[in-house]
Image (cartoon, helix red, strand yellow):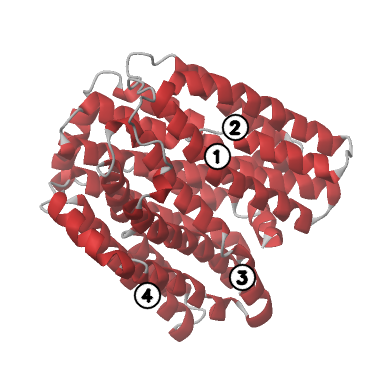
Amino acid sequence: TPQRLAQLSRQGLITQGLATYSNLIIVSSMPSRLTFMLTSYKRLFAVPGGWNFSFAGFILRMPISMLYIAIVLFVVAETGSYALAGALSMVASLVLSVATPLWSRVADQIGQNKVLSITAPVHLIFLGLFVYLVKSDAPTWSWFTSAIIFEAFVIGSGQMVRRRWIHVIGDDRKLIDTAYSFEALVDEVIFTSGPVLAAITASYFFPEAAIFTAMGFISVGTLLFLSQRKTQPPAHPRQVGDDHSLLIKDRFIQALFIPMMAVGAFFGSTGLVLVGYLDEFGIREYSGFYIAIWSFSSGISAFISGSLHWKINEARRFVISVFALALLTLPIYIAAQLFTGNLTILAIALFLNGLGIAPLLTAGFAVAERSVSPKRTTEVLAWSISALNLGGAIPAAITGYIIDTYGSTVAFIVPVICMLIALLSLLPFLSLWKAKVIQL
């Protein structure tokens, strides 16, 4: 799996950039009959300070999509060991999945700016130390130690931005849905452009350049975000009588976390299988193009989802969206099994599947946010995002083994299984979901 990831980073760089370009021009290229959709977004950015903190958040969370590939490329260049690079990245991902919700919990209690001013410097120091330790051929255990520390001091900027939208918008649920959809579109840009940028800087300059680029984004993004004091949500200090338990212990948060984790596993496994599949046909360099199609359709659905006036509430939308994405996964599997080698059909299947992604994520974040008090909004959003990240890391080894042993065509069953698990994980909590549909 690390080998395939590193190989992908060195090839198809231009085609991967198509996703970023496509997402950025989506608004300007909409047909005239859809221009009415812009009304919701005009209202959104008429909110005082909205554009400023959203842009700052965009810069601040760019490194999220860069560091995994940056670490792999750097460590492989220095040691030649894909196994070591993969192990470091895996440990970093797991630490991030746990640390982010905990820092978000603190951010709700003492304020976003205070937490960011603490975590960002420590993160930068130990990220720089990690580069030094690897370059100086220090003991391997010190690499893991520094990686654990720099990932332990990461606060999720994505959930901080979404929390600010909730704060500045108020009770307008329609506009909050638009904000969630817009940030989902921003995420598509980030997670498509980040790996491309990391690969370009590491390949054309020097191996650690990708890490230094990420550090630059963190530094600039932190300063920009800290300057947005007027839009910072109020802190909610811990008080006697408050519930201090972790939100993940709440049964409904578990009901949301588990299917979101399965969806994250679907994302991770689909990307790996797609690279392996194209590699078998000798066109690995076109992997970026097919990932761009997938990402582009998700960006379209994010834009449209944010402009619609939904007649059903968030809980019902989430359950329906999980079912819809599971169904839309079948065309990808069918394209690989029945139309093996027909890449046009595969592209169509990926486009159809991508349309189901943004509505699911938007509804998931919305139902999470409405399930807790404002005092814990950032924390619950962090758990939702951590579920996706953790799920994305879990199937990597299994998927890679199946690809290497049985071929990528067989491995297309893994994303299908992931979405089946997402569906089945709703069943034990069905009564809770029914109650939530009525409650919201």
The mark that comes first in sequence, 2 or 3, is 2
The residue positioned 36% from the left and 21% from the top of the image is 235
Q: Is residue 315 visible?
A: yes
Question: Looking at the picture, which amino acid does disc 1 mark?
Answer: Ala
3D distance between C-alphas at marks 1 and 4 = 37 Å
3D distance between C-alphas at marks 2 and 3 = 29 Å
Q: Which mark is residue 153?
A: 2
Location of mark 3 (residue): 398
Question: Looking at the picture, which amino acid does disc 3 mark?
Answer: Ile
Q: Which mark is residue 99?
A: 1
Is the C-beta separation of discs 4 and 3 under 8 Å?
no
Expressed as whole percent of the image width and height from the top left, the position of residue 46 reads 21, 23
Is the C-beta separation of discs 4 and 2 under 8 Å?
no
**How packed is label 3: few (under 14 Cα within 10 Å), some, or many (20 or more)?**
few
The mark that comes first in sequence, 4 or 3, is 4
Secondary element at tag 3: helix
Q: Which mark is residue 331?
A: 4
3D distance between C-alphas at marks 2 and 1 = 7 Å
Expressed as whole percent of the image width and height from the top left, the position of residue 93 reads 60, 48
The residue positioned 40% from the left and 36% from the top of the image is 244
Viewer-nearest of labels 2 and 3? 2
Q: Splitting the image into 4 quarters, where does residue 424 fall?
A: bottom left
The mark that comes first in sequence, 1 or 4, is 1
The residue positioned 62% from the left and 38% from the top of the image is 151
3D distance between C-alphas at marks 1 and 3 = 25 Å
Question: Looking at the picture, which amino acid does disc 2 mark?
Answer: Phe
